[in-house]
Image (cartoon, rainbow, N blue to C red):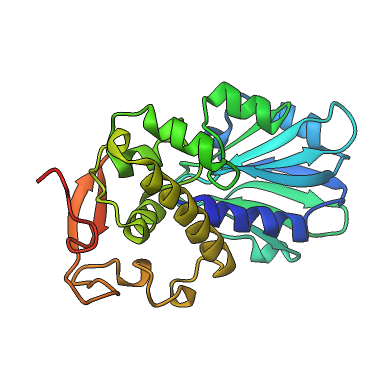
Amino acid sequence: MPELPDVEYYRIYLTATALHKTIARVEVRAPRILEGVTERRLRSVLAGRAFQSARRHGKYVFAAIEGGEGGWLVMHFGMTGRLSYFKDIGDDPKHDRFLIGFENGYFLAFVNQRKFGHVALAMSPEAFAEAKGLGPDALSIGREEFAVRLGERRGGAKATLMNQKVLAGIGNIYADEILFRAGVHPKTPVNTLDEETLGTLHAVMGDVLHTAIAAKRRCEDFPGSYLLPHRHEGGVCPLDGTPLETITISGRRTYFCPTHQSDERE
């Protein structure tokens, strides 16, 4: 599933390709991706208008709509979603579920093979996040609020980092990386972490997410000391070669180093 770095890349991509271009065509090819809006409503709001800016909150991208009633187009990418901007309709991706055609002859496709993503409208990113019960964005939350929000929870470290109501944007892969670099076992109850460890976790979280964005999500472009390139069957700790271990947390396969992330409860 696309996580914060992936979705930030989509926000950058949307900004670079699709802003300030008049929309001439709107086509929904998989109505099930629509959330709280009809195809007819989307057309009436978008046709003849343009996107003014793009923002992100957690795993959602928001595109501000110029003129008319204003508002924002909202996109969530589900398990396999992405955006594609192209000129020749013959290049339309196979799993295009929502297509926008611009007056300049180009198209923007919301590609979503498994149809787990969705498209919606919102008055603002803030209003949408509040209605969804989303926590603060993982790249904008301050250290103090981070410590307070985690300290209020009783769950394990990884499950808490992935809880979108606590913190928006982190999923399975980057939760593993953050905990590895902070030296925290994935099952450690977050309300047992001391102030110093919470501060480290917050700092590492920012470093990991910024590194992933800069690497444009390419595994080979991550530093050699990162867990991500070694996060596979038979993988070893990049720091000392210890075989990585796996457990299941919140239904997700979790990789960790038993040496650098020891479970202090044992």
Name the side, left or right, on which 127 lies relative to 101: left
Q: Where is residue 3 in the image (x, y as percent from the top left)?
A: 48, 51
Q: Where is residue 56 in the image (x, y as percent from the top left)?
A: 64, 44
List the single residue furthest toward the left.
266
Identity of the residue drawn at 87% across and 51% down: 20
192 relative to 92 in the view: left or right: left
Whether residue 38 can be seen here: no
Quarter where residue 71 is shown = top right
Of residues 134 and 53, the one drawn nearer to the viewer in this rendering:
134
In this rendered view, identify the residue nearer to me: 103 or 235: 235
Q: Which of 205 and 100 is in front in this view?
A: 205
234 relative to 253, above or below: below
Task: State the image coordinates of residue 65 (x, y, percent, origin top left).
Answer: 81, 37
Q: In this view, does 4 lie to the left or right of 17?
A: left
Which residue is drawn at the image coordinates 36% and 48% (left, top)?
197
Q: Looking at the image, which residue is at 78% across and 39% down?
A: 64
Total marks shown come to: 0
The residue depicted at 45 percent of the width and 31 percent of the height is 149
Q: In this view, does 120 lie above or below 181?
A: above
Q: Nearer the viewer, residue 265 or 160?
A: 265
